[in-house]
């Protein structure tokens, strides 16, 4: 009986350690990838907003025709 309880305790300890390692791995991955994604989205938005013309002018129409 004592040995069975000890084996279950070892298994729980091992399982908890795996969860901790998994959390550490995921946290490390997210800490690297989230800032990169945020930066890419911000750069995309900046580029998109600078190209967006709400009310086309004669100059923007001429420019669009030249770029074709």
Image (tube, rainbow, N blue to C red):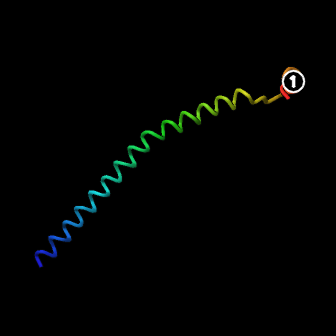
Which residue sits at x=58%, y=33%? 42
Outermost residue to the front: 68
Q: Which residue is mark 1?
A: 66
Which residue sits at x=87%, y=25%? 61
Q: Is residue 39 left or right of residue 55?
A: left
Which residue sits at x=87%, y=23%? 66
Outermost residue to the bottom: 1
Q: Is residue 9 left or right of residue 30?
A: left
> How far from the left and from the top, in percent, is residue 56?
84, 27
Quadrant in which the N terminus is drawn: bottom left
The total of numbered circles placed on residues is: 1
**Vertical comparison of 61 with 14: above or below:** above
**Vertical comparison of 5 with 16: above or below:** below
Q: Is residue 5 left or right of residue 26?
A: left
> How far from the left and from the top, in percent, is residue 39?
54, 33
Name the quadrant containing residue 13: bottom left
Which residue sits at x=51%, y=36%? 36
Q: Is residue 49 left or right of residue 55?
A: left
**Crowd class of label 1 (few under 14; some 14 to 19; many from 20; radius 10 Å):** few
Quadrant in which the C terminus is drawn: top right
Q: Which element type, helix, strand or loop, lies under badge 1?
A: helix
> How far from the left and from the top, in percent, is residue 22?
35, 53
> How far from the left and from the top, in percent, is residue 57?
86, 23
Out of 21 and 52, give the one closest to the viewer: 21
Name the quadrant containing residue 59: top right
Name the quadrant containing residue 64: top right
Outermost residue to the top: 59
């Amino acid at each position: 009986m004592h040995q069975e309880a000890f084996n279950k305790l070892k298994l729980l300890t091992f399982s908890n350690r795996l969860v901790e390692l998994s959390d550490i791995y995921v946290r490390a991955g997210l800490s690297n990838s989230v800032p990169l994604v945020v930066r890419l989205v911000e750069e995309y938005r900046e580029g998109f907003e600078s190209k967006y013309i709400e009310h086309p002018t004669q100059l923007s129409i001429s420019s669009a025709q030249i770029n074709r």
